[in-house]
Amino acid sequence: MQIQLNIHLNIISLHKKLSMALQPGSPAPQFTLFSSALKEVSLAGFKGKKVVLHFFPMAFTGTCTTQLCTMRDNFGYYDGLNATILGISVDSPFTLAKFKEENNYQFDLLSDFNKEISTAYGAIYEQFVFGLRGVSKRAAFVIDEEQNIIYAEVLEVATDLPDFAAIAAAVK
């Protein structure tokens, strides 16, 4: 009886998490975070532009570097479409500053050290590798000029990469 109750409660909890996931058409959760340059960056400041948000688990790891370097190498494409790119992780702004410098990223990296924005976007691991808790999931969102989500992708497997072609199509 207790096992059935626990299974039922787990299913209800999973259903609530899935139903709370951000979908295209949803208003984008607003935020103000510190950048790697130790400046406040607010989503509201980009109203009138499209915004591509890339959440990533940890600076200086292989897949995260690949994800952001792909965006770096395609930066001109997004610039020509009145769009900006922002990277977000729970790393400190100081770690993100070094990561940005070493990889020559042209876009801001934002520190969600308190995990509030990753949580608001449904892009957070409760449990991650090495017993770490509260690490950003790899995720991508495209936000339109009116600050509504037009593309949402949250990956469960940290070594998977977002669908860059779908992101580019959503921005276009």
Image: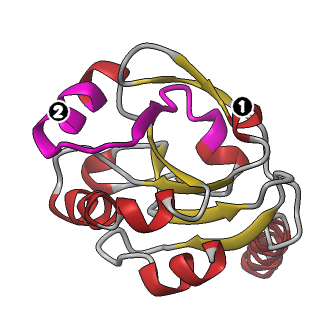
Q: Is residue 62 visible?
A: yes
Q: Which mark is residue 45?
A: 1
* Left or right of 131, for residue 169: right
136 is higher (above) or lower (below) than 148: above
Q: Position of residue 157 (x, y in %)?
A: 39, 75
Residue that numbered label 2 is attached to: 101
Callout 1, which amino acid? Gly
Counting labels gives: 2
* Badge 1 density bin: few <14, some 14–19, many ≥20, Cα 10 Å: few
Image quarter hosting the C terminus: bottom right
- In depth, the one of 94 and 171 nearer the eye is 171
Q: Residue at x 78, y 42 (%)?
A: 47
Callout 2, which amino acid? Glu
Sequence-wise, the earlier of marks 2 and 1 is: 1
Q: Position of residue 83 (x, y in %)?
A: 59, 56
* Left or right of 120, for residue 59: left
Q: Which mark is residue 117?
A: none
Task: Give the color scheme: rainbow, by chain, secondary structure or one colour.
Answer: secondary structure
Give the magenta-colored segment's residue range.
96-117
* Left or right of 27, for residue 57: left
115 is higher (above) or lower (below) than 79: above
Q: Residue at x 62, y 63 (%)?
A: 141
Image quarter hosting the N terminus: bottom right
Q: Residue furthest front?
A: 80
- In depth, the one of 129 and 47 nearer the eye is 47
- In depth, the one of 52 and 156 nearer the eye is 52
Q: Position of residue 2 (x, y in %)?
A: 77, 72
Magenta-drawn stretch contains 108: yes
Q: Is residue 21 visible?
A: no
* Badge 2 density bin: few <14, some 14–19, many ≥20, Cα 10 Å: few
Q: Residue furthest left?
A: 102
